[in-house]
């Protein structure tokens, strides 16, 4: 209203003679002096307490090493004060984005899956699922008989397991995690959960925050009560045996190294039996049951060797039998199918390292000499990424170039009989073996339908070994994750769960209700030469968003000429040449695939004209074992240079506007982004580092949190002089440039992360010390809630804060 009155006064003055102008002014009018803009908040300065380190004739000083002195009460009090200052500074810098954050949070919350139940998992006669009760923070684990609920749809029919038509409660609550939260200090974080094969017991581990370990509990599902035994602390693995009457479990030492294997017999008053103890400090123990519950496999591994033992599940105290051994650290998974052992591994062949996984087979008959046969002839054009078994089929996830495929092969495989003659006593033994290595196409695989632009295929739990229906999660940069059940016996498939972004709803389907007319037409009895891409007219079945968001692939030449895969996603209506801001994701460690799944929070950036890009740098899992090894240890610099090359490509090809490119890295990906910023600080305008690994020199040399052999294989051994030099060269904390303008960076961390909050705090403080201070390019430390407190609302809030930060820094 004041603006309106001022306008009226102004127009009236124009019509009056000049002598009347003073009549229009207020009696006590005083022109106000323009107010100076508020001074930007100043970043906190933690105290410096320099400490000198020396190794391999190299001496360096760390002024902030005190931040990791967890046992120093004075240092921790200083740390608490400093963390509070950082929190207030971040709030002050981001205060002008409050409205934007609220809008973003509202957008993201509206896209969150509205389902209150997980997809029901059929195992034997039961449907298992978790659902959320109104007003409760944590879910409830439930089950109900599948025979009574063939059209069970999510949590909606019947509500809370009560059938109003019959007046009977048909749902059984197995575990209420809200009650578990009361046992464990107000929150519930479960790591392991295994139902026994007879469906009577539930073994699970809950995190005890006060003691910092996972505690084992076993619940009798018939009565809902906790069993007296076994009760163990620091449990890292579980496996059922003896049809559910015995539980094997692994415990860790005080350095969190899994090293002891125990067996607990139900109904026995005797103490749990120690089956195995690894005294060697760098040897780890891991167990799992085969899918048919006939055996328990025991893996012992270190950087020098990998071994697999078998335990007869029917008699778990009968001892361990060695079935596989190889040099160096290797991935070894053993399965059993009707008298045959199948080994999926990437171990060296004939002393020569291999680039990809392969499948071996051997008779389970331990009386014959152990002989492993290749199942498939090596094919560099068709790479096996993963395998899964059921009683009737072998399912393979394969990759042809960048294209993922999913196919099934009927079991059992063709076999032949071998006869052994020993010179001593001329003993004759007979054993069956797979009939030599063959090409996959010779087994007439059936390729299962997939959508376009598949970035990852993940096997589901698939507990029901005797069911021909297997579940997989299909991921894509331009499609919400689809949970799909494939019936391998008749070729039918159903999308069990997928969020529909166009209608802002989630469909969770099961049984007959999942066949939405057209789905029934999608028979997949195809020959080996058929394509696995569905026809365009069937794309609507997948809720594919490629009509609205484009997905493109490029090969970027790195510093040494190696081609690096780059994937970009953008809105079809908002793309302009050299005018779009961009966000470049990276991981590049442990041979793991870069997560390129559709994430609903990124839609807020895409709809604002951002280009979201993914760099599959060396060190990750996109190009086989060699691709991984070429980006780890002394070759870690390849990951960083690959990332820089992809960033330059986006700008040079005018995909992203210059000075509007931001970086994003999680965990080890944070190391890559931070190192790239050290080398090319002018290439980025902003970056988000989530729980990043930033101080490898000190963390690898003086680990505060336990590290595994894989960690040292990945980043190097400080005791080795070549590895040490490489670590010092790529370390983000040790290579911050002086008197250079750095991009704006938000570092998100927590006291309960794998890489402690002190790494983030040290890096933030040192960047501020060395780099040129510019309030328009702040270095922020954002302390998130503990990762064990899983809360979708808080995750949405954190995503809104990070997105608002990126938008503000790019627009400034």
Image: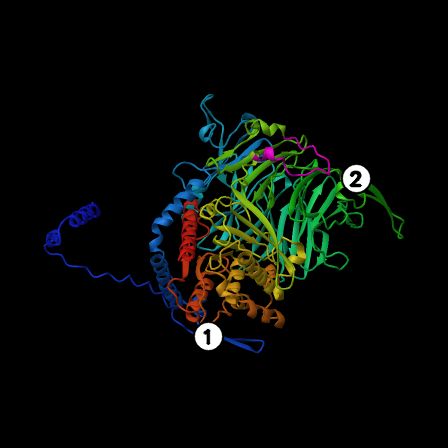
Is 490 placed left or right of 149 in the picture?
Answer: right
The quadrant of the rendering that contains the N terminus is top left
Reading the chain from its start, which is encountered first: label 2 or label 1? 1
Q: In the rendered view, tell whether residue 102 sits above or below residue 146.
A: below
Taking the spot 57% from the left edge, 78% from the top edge, the residue there is: 57
- Taking depth in this image into account, of 678 and 53 the one nearest to the observer is 678
Instruction: Quickly name the residue at label 2.
Output: 414
Mark 2 and mark 1 in contact? Answer it, CB < 8 Å.
Answer: no
Inter-mark Cα distance, 2 to 1: 66 Å
Tell me the element at label 1: strand
Q: In the rendered view, tell whether residue 141 sits above or below residue 594.
A: above
- Taking depth in this image into account, of 143 and 757 the one nearest to the observer is 757
Tell me the element at label 2: loop
The quadrant of the rendering that contains the C terminus is bottom left
Tag shown at residue 149: none
- Taking depth in this image into account, of 654 and 117 the one nearest to the observer is 654
């Amino acid at each position: 209203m004041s603006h309106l009155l001022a306008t009226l006064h102004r127009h009236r003055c124009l019509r009056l003679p000049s002598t009347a102008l003073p009549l229009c002014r207020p009696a006590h009018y005083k022109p106000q002096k323009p107010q100076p803009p508020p001074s930007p908040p100043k970043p906190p300065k933690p105290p410096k307490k320099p400490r000198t380190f020396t190794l391999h004739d190299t001496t360096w000083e760390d002024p902030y090493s005190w931040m990791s002195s967890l046992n120093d009460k004075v240092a921790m009090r200083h740390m608490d004060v400093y963390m509070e200052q950082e929190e207030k500074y971040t709030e002050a810098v981001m205060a002008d984005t409050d409205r934007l954050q609220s809008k973003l949070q509202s957008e993201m919350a509206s896209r969150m899956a509205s389902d209150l139940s997980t997809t029901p998992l059929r195992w034997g006669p039961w449907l298992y699922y978790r659902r959320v009760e109104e007003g409760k923070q944590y879910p409830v684990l439930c089950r109900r008989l599948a025979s009574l609920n063939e059209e069970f749809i999510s949590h909606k029919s019947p509500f809370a397991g009560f059938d109003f038509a019959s007046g009977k409660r048909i749902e059984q609550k197995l575990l209420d995690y809200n009650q578990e939260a009361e046992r464990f200090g107000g929150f519930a974080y479960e790591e392991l959960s295994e139902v026994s094969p007879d469906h009577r017991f539930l073994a699970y581990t809950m995190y005890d925050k006060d003691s910092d370990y996972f505690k084992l509990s076993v619940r009798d599902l018939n009565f809902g009560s906790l069993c007296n035994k076994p009760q163990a602390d620091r449990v890292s693995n579980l496996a059922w045996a003896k049809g559910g009457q015995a539980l094997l479990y692994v415990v860790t030492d005080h350095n969190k190294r899994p090293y002891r294997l125990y067996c607990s017999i139900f109904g026995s008053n005797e103490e749990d039996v120690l089956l195995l103890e690894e005294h060697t400090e760098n040897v780890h123990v891991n167990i799992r049951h085969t899918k048919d519950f006939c055996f328990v496999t025991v893996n012992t591994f270190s950087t020098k060797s990998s071994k697999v033992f078998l335990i007869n599940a029917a008699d778990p105290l009968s001892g361990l039998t060695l079935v596989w051994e190889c040099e160096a650290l290797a991935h070894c998974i053993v399965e059993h199918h009707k008298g045959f052992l199948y080994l999926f591994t990437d171990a060296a062949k004939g002393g020569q390292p291999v680039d990809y996984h392969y499948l071996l087979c051997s008779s389970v008959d331990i009386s014959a000499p152990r002989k492993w046969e290749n199942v498939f002839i090596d094919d560099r054009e068709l790479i096996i990424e993963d395998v899964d078994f059921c009683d009737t089929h072998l399912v393979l996830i394969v990759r042809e170039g960048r294209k993922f495929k999913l196919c099934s092969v009927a079991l059992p495989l063709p076999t032949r009989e071998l006869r052994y003659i020993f010179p001593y006593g001329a003993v004759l033994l007979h054993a069956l073996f797979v009939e030599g290595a063959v090409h996959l196409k010779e087994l007439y695989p059936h390729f299962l339908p997939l959508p376009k632009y598949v970035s990852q295929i993940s096997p589901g739990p698939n507990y029901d070994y005797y069911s021909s229906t297997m579940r997989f999660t299909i991921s894509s940069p331009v499609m919400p994750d689809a949970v799909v059940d494939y019936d391998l016996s008749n070729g039918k498939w159903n999308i069990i769960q997928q969020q529909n972004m166009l209608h802002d709803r989630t469909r969770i389907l099961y049984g007959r209700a999942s066949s939405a007319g057209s789905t029934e037409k999608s028979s997949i009895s195809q020959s080996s030469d058929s394509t696995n891409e569905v026809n365009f007219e069937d794309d609507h079945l997948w809720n594919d968003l490629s009509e609205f968001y484009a997905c493109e692939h490029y090969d970027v030449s790195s510093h040494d000429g190696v081609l690096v895969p780059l994937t970009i996603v953008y809105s079809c209506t908002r793309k302009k040449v050299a005018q779009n801001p961009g966000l470049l994701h990276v991981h590049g460690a442990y041979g793991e695939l870069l997560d390129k799944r559709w994430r609903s929070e990124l839609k807020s950036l895409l709809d604002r004209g951002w280009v979201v890009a993914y760099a599959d740098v060396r060190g990750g899992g996109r190009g086989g074992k060699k691709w991984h090894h070429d980006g780890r240890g002394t070759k870690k610099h390849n990951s960083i240079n690959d990332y820089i090359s992809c960033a330059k490509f986006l700008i040079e090809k005018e995909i992203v506007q210059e000075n509007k490119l931001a970086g994003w890295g999680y965990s080890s990906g944070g190391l890559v982004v931070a190192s790239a910023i050290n080398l090319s600080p002018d290439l980025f305008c902003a970056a988000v580092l989530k729980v990043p690994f930033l101080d490898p020199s000190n963390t690898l040399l003086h680990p505060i949190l336990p590290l595994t052999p894989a960690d040292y294989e990945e980043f190097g051994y400080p005791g080795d002089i070549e590895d040490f030099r490489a670590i010092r060269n790529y370390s983000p904390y040790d290579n911050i440039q002086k008197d250079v303008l750095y991009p704006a960076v938000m570092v998100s961390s927590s006291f309960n992360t794998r890489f402690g909050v002190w790494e983030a705090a040290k890096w933030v403080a040192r960047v501020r010390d060395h780099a040129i201070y510019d309030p328009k390019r702040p270095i922020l430390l954002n302390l998130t809630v503990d990762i064990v407190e899983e809360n979708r609302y808080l995750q949405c809030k954190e995503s809104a804060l990070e997105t608002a930060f990126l938008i503000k820094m790019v627009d400034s």
